[in-house]
């Protein structure tokens, strides 16, 4: 079973975010406990990327603005496409790792409907539309003479990378990399996706709370990456536009007050709890930036026929997986025929590039050097995989 299917089927995700002090303790008891040793505070993008830019794409109907994060000054451009619900910030730690190994330039893109990108029709997440977005952003950045570009995409982003390549929207494309996305596994996982999405918390009381949940639930196994990546996945609730957010606060207050009343001295505890809740009400909760459940009609279009599309791309190709047990027939035959390079990175979750950024950077760097697309720096030594 693939990492994605394990995440969907094992039901490891808690229905609610963890309480700051752990367990079901009251606010006063949590403050009396020992301090946390793990730091769940958010980290700024600027610690990993050199610059941030909003790229304006104009057409006959108006303007769209796409957020990108950049690093590097020379070498081929690695155009990074994130998975569904994530953002360009999911590539932050990977960016630091790859920039220190090879000469390259990084462009990490917030796809439409995600992160800080603002488009007129964010609900249109069809593969065709998002592939055109990628081509339009590259054209806006580089004009008619784009530099050599390698497309790297994770999950949904991997599918969009393939659709972009097949549509020949990047004339300077020199390579293609998909990370933990296989047609057969993805199509099977779609049946459980709605249950997976319903199992996630709808709100978090803070960014720290969201980061803590992402690590403890296994969505992101690398705390360093979670601290920068989750900022791009959640946003502050707008009370006027999102009436369900205040409701979530009230429900939590009622449940905790009922539990406190059963304890000895419940009156004073309950009073302190209400005071704490008054402060909580003043805070803005955080919720997901995109409601992935509403994008279901596009899921099939992202992944159906993906294996053959990937194999049909004439450029050198790399497939990075968390496991090979669900590699489908077409890709198995293609790999045996040497049509692409494959590398398995075990002990990772579905977010392979976040869980093991150094290993992914090493694999990508080796791939680029092997094809003479770039040069190593900092004494980096290639480690060629067995498959």
Image (cartoon, helix red, strand yellow):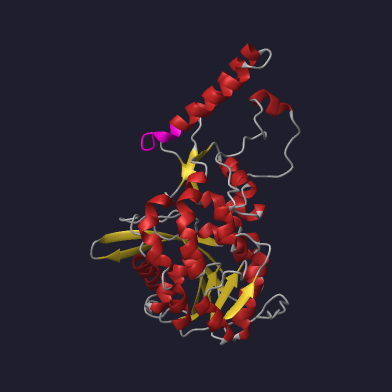
Q: Residue at x 37, y 77 (%)?
A: 167
**Residue 164 in view in this figure:** yes
- Residue 93 vs residue 45, the one in the foreground: 93
Residue at horizontal 56 percent and vertical 74 percent from the top: 319
Quick check: is 262 in the magenta stretch?
no
Residue 85's x, y, as percent?
A: 47, 54
Q: State the extent of the magenta-drawn residues as a range.
A: 240-246
Q: Is residue 14 above or below residue 252?
A: below
Please say whether residue 282 is visible from this viewpoint: no
Above/below status of 132 relative to 224: below
In the rendered image, residue 244 lying in the magenta stretch gets the answer yes
Between 294 and 334, the residue placed more toward the observer is: 334
Say whether residue 40 is left or right of residue 172. right
* Quadrant (top left/top right/bottom left/bottom right) for the C terminus: bottom right
- The number of numbered discs placed on residues in the rendered structure image is 0
Query: Residue lying furthest right in this view?
Result: 34
In the rendered image, the quadrant that contains the N terminus is bottom right
* Quarter of the figure with residue 66: bottom left
Q: Position of residue 126 (x, y in %)?
A: 35, 63
Horizontal and vertical percent position of residue 383? 71, 79
Residue 77 position, x and y percent, is 51, 74
Q: Residue at x 49, y 84 (%)?
A: 315
Q: Is residue 174 above or below residue 222?
A: below
Extreme residue in the left direction:
60
């Amino acid at each position: 079973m693939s990492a994605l299917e394990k995440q969907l089927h094992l039901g490891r995700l808690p229905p609610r975010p963890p309480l700051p002090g752990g367990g079901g303790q009251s606010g006063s008891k949590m403050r009396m406990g020992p301090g946390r040793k793990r730091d769940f505070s958010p980290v700024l993008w600027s610690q990993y990327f050199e610059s941030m830019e909003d790229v304006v794409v104009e057409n006959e109907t108006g303007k769209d603005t796409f957020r990108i994060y950049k690093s590097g000054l020379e070498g081929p451009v690695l155009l990074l496409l994130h998975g569904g619900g994530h953002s360009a910030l999911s590539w932050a730690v990977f960016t630091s790792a790859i920039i220190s190994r090879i000469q390259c330039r990084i462009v990490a893109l917030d796809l439409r409907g995600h992160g800080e990108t603002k488009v007129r029709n964010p609900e249109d997440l069809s593969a065709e539309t998002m592939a055109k977005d990628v081509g339009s952003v590259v054209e806006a950045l580089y004009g008619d003479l784009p530099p050599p570009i390698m497309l790297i995409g994770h999950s949904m982003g991997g599918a969009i990378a393939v659709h972009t390549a097949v549509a020949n929207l990047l004339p300077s494309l020199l390579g293609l990399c998909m990370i933990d996305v296989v047609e057969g596994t993805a199509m099977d996982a779609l049946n459980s996706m709605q249950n997976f999405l319903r199992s996630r918390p709808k709100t978090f009381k803070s960014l720290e709370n969201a980061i803590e949940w992402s690590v403890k639930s296994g969505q992101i196994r690398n705390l360093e990456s979670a601290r920068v990546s989750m900022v791009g996945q959640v946003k502050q609730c707008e009370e006027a536009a999102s009436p369900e957010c205040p409701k979530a606060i009230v429900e939590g207050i009622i449940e905790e007050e009922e539990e406190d009343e059963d304890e000895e001295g419940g009156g004073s505890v309950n009073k302190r709890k209400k005071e704490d809740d008054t402060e909580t009400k003043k805070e803005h909760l955080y919720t997901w930036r995109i409601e992935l459940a509403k994008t279901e009609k596009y899921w099939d279009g992202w992944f159906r026929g993906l294996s053959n599309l990937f194999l049909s791309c004439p450029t050198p190709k790399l497939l990075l997986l968390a496991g090979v047990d669900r590699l489908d027939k077409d890709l198995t035959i293609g790999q045996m025929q040497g049509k692409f390079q494959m590398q398995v990175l075990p002990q990772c979750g579905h977010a392979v590039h976040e869980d093991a950024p150094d290993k992914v950077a090493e694999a990508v760097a080796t791939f680029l050097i092997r094809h003479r697309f770039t040069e190593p720096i900092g004494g980096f030594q290639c480690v060629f995989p067995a498959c």
